[in-house]
Image: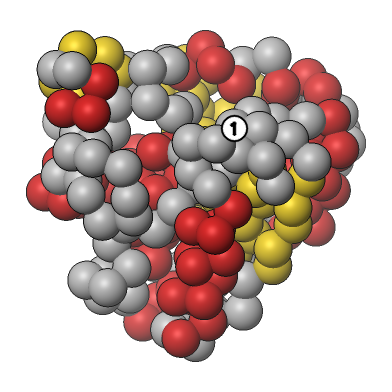
């Protein structure tokens, strides 16, 4: 079976949990590599960070330029994307989760983290996975499949956190608030945190990510 190419970073010799972290449009798996040491996770948690590279795609909204992307964006807005490509990317993430389970990590110890486009894929992949996961963390993201996704019963109680910048010009904060609204209608109880930043990450957010990972991983 073929898997997405990815960077893997293990924090300890004995791995008890996995974090699959998806980058945003035009970036690659190296994008969040420098963040991992900043998380300062305790020695009691052995985590394998998997930072996959999205395939090269033609992006309509960027004048047909080719770049790493999880799906094509047709125009600005919540729904104007190539849904089939997003679902295909979600299936690739399912394969990565299954591989972690085969490597001995319980599915309940797998976290999906995604920035921007990557977060949209994590929401689709996490909600539809057929085994319980530890949680989803969406960073500066949106939920383009909110009206069509069919959550799997295994993840009806999935912990979800959404972090967003209040000054984000690319994905305005109302998109994040809509994500919270959609998840609430589905029966989830997502936690929302806003930061005074643009389409990026900040030190306070990194500290919150670290705290959250410690709270849900053993």
Between 41 and 13, the one lying in front of the other is 41
Between 164 and 93, the one lying in front of the other is 164
Between 5 and 23, the one lying in front of the other is 23
Mark 1: few, some, or many residues within 10 Å (few <14, many ≥20)?
Answer: some
* In the image, residue 151 above or below residue 217: below
- Give the structural element (helix, strand or loop) at label 1: loop
User: Residue 123: x and y, percent?
Assistant: 42, 57
- Pointer 1: what residue? 199
- Determine the residue positioned at 66% across, 33% down: 198
Q: Is residue 140 left or right of residue 40?
A: left
Q: Is residue 158 left or right of residue 11?
A: left
Q: Quadrant of the C terminus?
A: bottom right
Observer able to see residue 172: yes
- Determine the residue positioned at 49% across, 65% down: 179
Q: Is residue 144 left or right of residue 43?
A: left
User: Residue 34: x and y, percent?
Assistant: 69, 14
User: Residue 209: x and y, percent?
Assistant: 75, 43
């Amino acid at each position: 079976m073929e898997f997405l190419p990815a960077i893997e970073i293990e924090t300890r010799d004995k791995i008890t949990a996995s974090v699959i972290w998806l980058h945003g449009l035009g970036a690659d798996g190296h994008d969040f590599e420098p963040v991992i040491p900043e998380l300062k996770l305790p020695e009691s948690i052995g985590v394998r960070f998997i930072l996959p590279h999205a395939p090269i795609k033609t992006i309509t909204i960027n004048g047909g330029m080719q770049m790493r992307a999880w799906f094509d964006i047709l125009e600005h807005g919540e729904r104007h994307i190539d849904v089939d490509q997003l679902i295909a990317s979600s299936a690739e993430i399912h394969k990565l989760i299954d591989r972690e389970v085969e490597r001995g990590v319980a599915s309940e110890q797998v976290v999906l983290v995604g920035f921007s486009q990557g977060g949209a894929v994590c929401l689709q992949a996490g909600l539809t996975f057929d085994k319980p996961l530890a949680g989803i963390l969406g960073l500066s993201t949106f939920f383009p499949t909110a009206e069509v996704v069919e959550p799997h019963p295994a993840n009806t109680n999935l912990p979800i956190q959404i972090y967003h910048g209040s000054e984000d010009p690319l994905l305005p904060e109302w998109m994040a608030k809509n994500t919270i609204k959609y998840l609430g209608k589905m029966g989830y109880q997502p936690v929302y945190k806003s930061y005074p930043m643009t389409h990026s990450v900040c030190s306070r957010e990194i500290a919150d990510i670290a705290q959250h990972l410690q709270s849900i991983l053993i």
